[in-house]
Amino acid sequence: FTITDFMIHPKERGHFFIGTTNSGIWRSKDEGRSWEKIVDRAGALMANTEILRIAISGSNPKIWYVAAYQQNRGSLLKTDDGGENFREVYFVPVERFGVFDVWIDESGRSVFVVTGQGGFLESKDGGKSWRVVRWFPDGVIRLISDPRSSSTFYLSTPRGKMFKTVDRGNTWTDLTSRFDSFDKSRRNQNLVLDRLNGALYLGSDY
């Protein structure tokens, strides 16, 4: 399998998690020297699931949200007990569109997801209910939060467009024109936000 995501436990030193293309989630408790596969006793997380993102609550690390693709659809799974039992709290209503990214606040109750269908959605009650904040026609594949401001997010689309909001998604600014002059900058993008100074870096085929 291919590793799709890597997460460090917010409190336990040397505890790592990886998401994979077709083998679910794996965990290491010894800085990566050995690994064990996480098996969901509730059965919501399937053994061959593709994992796109793992988000763990900073204040309560037993709460995880997992952006997954299984049974030909995107799904958001949640565990309240550190991976022992999962349940589905959201799914994309159209097949073949994934839940590509997820962001949670420290408490794990405020949640944002982005989907290949183009949705930017919010839940304020830990995934029990959802509202569509904005639809994007190209779909959305990446969501980045600014740790210095809980209202500021960046997202990118499959066509290489990038948008920014400073009010939790009510209004958006298209940033694409700022790097359009760089040849191939819309291809194979990878966005990284410097958590110390808020600088945003874009890696691409340019």
Image: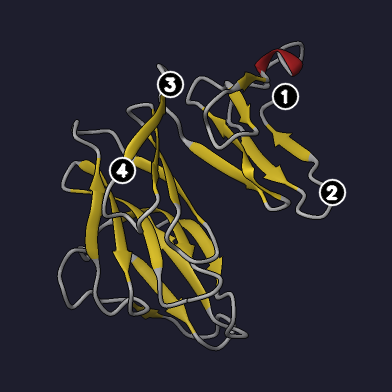
Secondary structure of the residue carrying tag 2 is: loop
Count neighbours of disc 4 (C-alpha within 10 A) and say few if under 14, some if 14 to 19, many if 20 or more: some
On the picture, is 41 further left or further right than 192?
A: left
Residue 18 in view (yes/no): yes
Residue 23 in view (yes/no): no
Report x, y in % for residue 59: 54, 74
Report x, y in % for residue 16: 53, 75
Count neighbours of disc 3 (C-alpha within 10 A) and say few if under 14, some if 14 to 19, many if 20 or more: some
Asked if disc 3 and disc 1 are in contact, CB closer than 8 Å, the reply is no
- Count how many numbered circles sit on residues in the image: 4
Please tell me which residue is depicted at 16% across the width and 47% down the height of the picture. 71
Asked if disc 3 and disc 2 are in contact, CB closer than 8 Å, the reply is no
Residue with the mark numbered 2? 197
Residue with the mark numbered 3? 136
- Give above or below for 198 relative to 97: below
Count neighbours of disc 2 (C-alpha within 10 A) and say few if under 14, some if 14 to 19, many if 20 or more: few
Residue with the mark numbered 4? 130
Secondary structure of the residue carrying tag 1 is: loop
Distance from the alpha carbon under mark 3 to that under mark 1: 25 Å
Q: Earlier in the sequence, mark 3 or mark 1?
A: 3
- Give above or below for 206 relative to 16: above
Secondary structure of the residue carrying tag 3 is: loop
